[in-house]
Amino acid sequence: MHDARVLVVDDSAAMRALFCDVLEQSKNVVVVGTAASAAEARSQIAQLQPNVVTLDVEMPGMSGIEFLEEIMSTNPMPVVMLSALTQSGTETSLKAFELGAVECFPKPLKATPEQFAKTVGKLGKVVVAAANSNVRDRPRHRGPKAESTEGYTPNGKIAAFSTSMGGVDALTEVLGHYPKNCPPTVIILQTEPALAEMFIARANKDCACAIKAVADGAELVAGTVHIAFDPGKHVIVEPGSPPKLRTVEREPVEGFRPSATLLFGTIARGGLSAIGAVLTGMGEDGAKGLKLLQAAGCRTLAQDRGTATVPQAPAAAVEAGAVDAELKLEELAADMLTQCGTAEG
């Protein structure tokens, strides 16, 4: 893992100073320069050669989203967008992911001192992960909407995923391959709640199957994907016919809530037939749980580390010996559907 060499781009001198101060206190982070506009940033990138850019969405002249599009089309590099998570801000964040941003980080504009410290403290870890991402090499494509509803029959097996940084892009790809009558699916998505809600609303319109936020007591049945993102609650699976999702207020598991390891573990302990997968993301959440699924006889997958936007989480699962196969996203989606049902023709 190499250090992050960051260029901070923001039209506000106060915000530039704030984020520089935060980043300079972070381990393995060096701020190589700042810029107040896209034109200034363009020059600084050429001169300073940063390996990460933090980019404000709202700037005079060329906006952050327009400059992001320019960067990704002319000189692709890891970009972390900084945005207030308002209604328009979350819509812009989803657009930023589509264009190739590694992460969209919330500006802590109206936070308590405790919330502020927690939020900005995470920024250093985000930029280090971005500096070690595969953004330059990852394919920029979208899975086709699976319009066919008659050719796929689920076999009752549960599909369970976990993902964090880079996860919106990865889930867009995987769920784009899901048919209307998809396997019962539960997903841990570690991202800002407002962004997750916006993603779910968009995915529910764009995908052939139903996409919903996890709700306590929801039944795991074919045709519906449940996404858990509430940082105040874990989600577990309760065995039954059909199995049910339960939300529980417990302490974080190894720093994560909701915890993929806890989710996978309840599926394994419940003796349920399932297939589990760890996609792009930071940290090691899911690795131990995937190992439990594997020991219970379930098939386990990880997104290919060479193409995962942020390979930390898939790498942790592979290194734990918890992965049966390491696959690119399209292959992973196909494997998941094959394991969880049958298709005609």
Image (cartoon, rainbow, N blue to C red):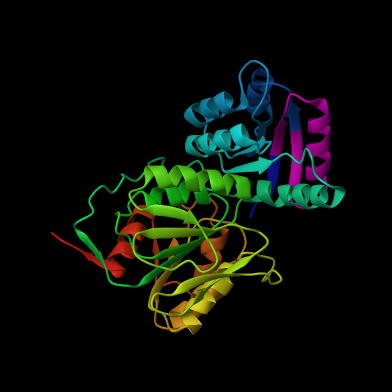
Q: Is residue 201 magenta?
A: no
Give me the residue at 69% from left, 49% from top: 3
Q: Nearer the viewer, residue 334 or 54?
A: 334
| Residue 237 placement (x, y as % from top left) | 50, 74
- Residue 314 falls left or right of residue 83: left
Residue for point 68% across, 25% down = 44
- Image quarter (top left, top right, bottom left or bottom right) of the N terminus: bottom right
62 left or right, relative to 251: left
Asked whether 9 falls inside the magenta stretch, the response is yes
Callout count: 0
339 shown above or below 163: below
Residue 183 position, x and y percent, is 34, 64
Which residue extends farthest left?
345
Image quadrant assignment for residue 139:
top left
Image spot of residue 49 (x, y percent): 65, 33
Q: Is residue 9 left or right of residue 220?
A: right
Q: At 43% from the left edge and 53% from the top edge, which residue is drawn?
A: 211
Would you say residue 320 is visible in this rendering? no
The answer to whether residue 294 is visible is yes
Segment colored magenta:
6-32
